């Protein structure tokens, strides 16, 4: 199994991935700088290669995290119970927290920067959630390249 990391900031992507690795994530991490690209990559793979965890930045240009979640809503039955989705945000706005509660797919909100305790929590919740550790091979992109 594997993890999707979706954030438009390359530095945040790098730091979040490093924190996940230091915290014990063994699963391959597919990084995307655009939510629309991640969505295009994810949808055809829903039945065969669903990520165990998605870490999604809320504030991004073009397609933001809320729009990504809206696009996933029709697939809730496929994702629910099989994929944990966490919002990554630097915002402390209560409106974001309230809005997040309206999405059944959201497992939690993580305030940037990700820290070791948050990584341990994700790992513990994931292992409790599925009984499977976060490990396994990453799927290849259709053209044989790594998604970016």
Image (cartoon, rainbow, N blue to C red):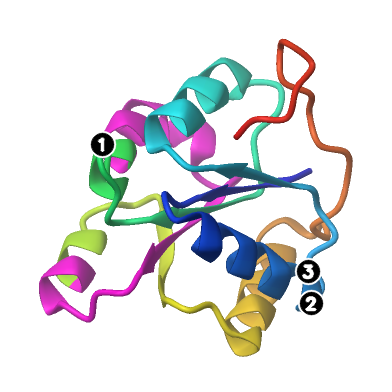
Q: CA distance from mark 1 to mark 2?
A: 32 Å
Q: Quadrant of residue 20?
A: bottom right
- Counting from the top left corner in percent of width and height, residue 25 is at 78, 65
- Counting from the top left corner in percent of width and height, residue 114 is at 53, 77
Location of mark 3 (residue): 21
Q: Which residues are magenta?
A: 69-97
Q: Earlier in the sequence, mark 1 or mark 2?
A: 2
Outermost residue toward the front? Answer: 11
Q: Name the residue located 25 percent from the left edge and 61 percent from the top edge.
A: 100
Location of mark 1 (residue): 70
* Residue 146 falls left or right of residue 62: right
- Please tell me whether residue 6 is drawn above or below residue 123 in the rendered image: above
Q: Quadrant of the C terminus?
A: top right
Q: Name the residue located 42 percent from the left edge and 37 percent from the top edge.
A: 34
Q: Along the line of sight, which residue is nearer the eye, 37 or 87?
A: 37
Q: CA distance from mark 3 to mark 2?
A: 4 Å
**Other-residue count near label 1 (Cα within 10 Å), few / some / many at <14 / 14–19 / ≥20:** few
Pair 1/3: label in front: 3
- Label at residue 22: 2
């Amino acid at each position: 199994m594997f993890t999707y990391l979706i954030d438009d900031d390359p530095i945040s992507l790098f730091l979040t991935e490093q924190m996940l690795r230091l915290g014990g994530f063994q699963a391959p991490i597919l990084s995307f700088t655009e939510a629309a690209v991640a969505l295009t990559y994810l949808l055809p793979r829903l039945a065969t290669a669903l990520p165990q965890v998605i870490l999604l930045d809320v504030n991004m240009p073009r397609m933001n995290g809320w729009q990504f979640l809206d696009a996933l809503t029709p697939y809730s039955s496929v994702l629910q119970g099989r994929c944990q989705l966490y919002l990554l945000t630097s915002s402390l706005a209560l409106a974001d927290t309230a809005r997040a509660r309206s999405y059944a797919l959201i497992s939690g909100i993580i305030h940037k920067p990700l820290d070791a305790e948050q990584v341990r929590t994700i790992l513990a919740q994931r292992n409790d959630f599925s009984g499977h550790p976060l490990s396994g091979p990453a799927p290849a992109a259709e053209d044989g390249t790594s998604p970016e």
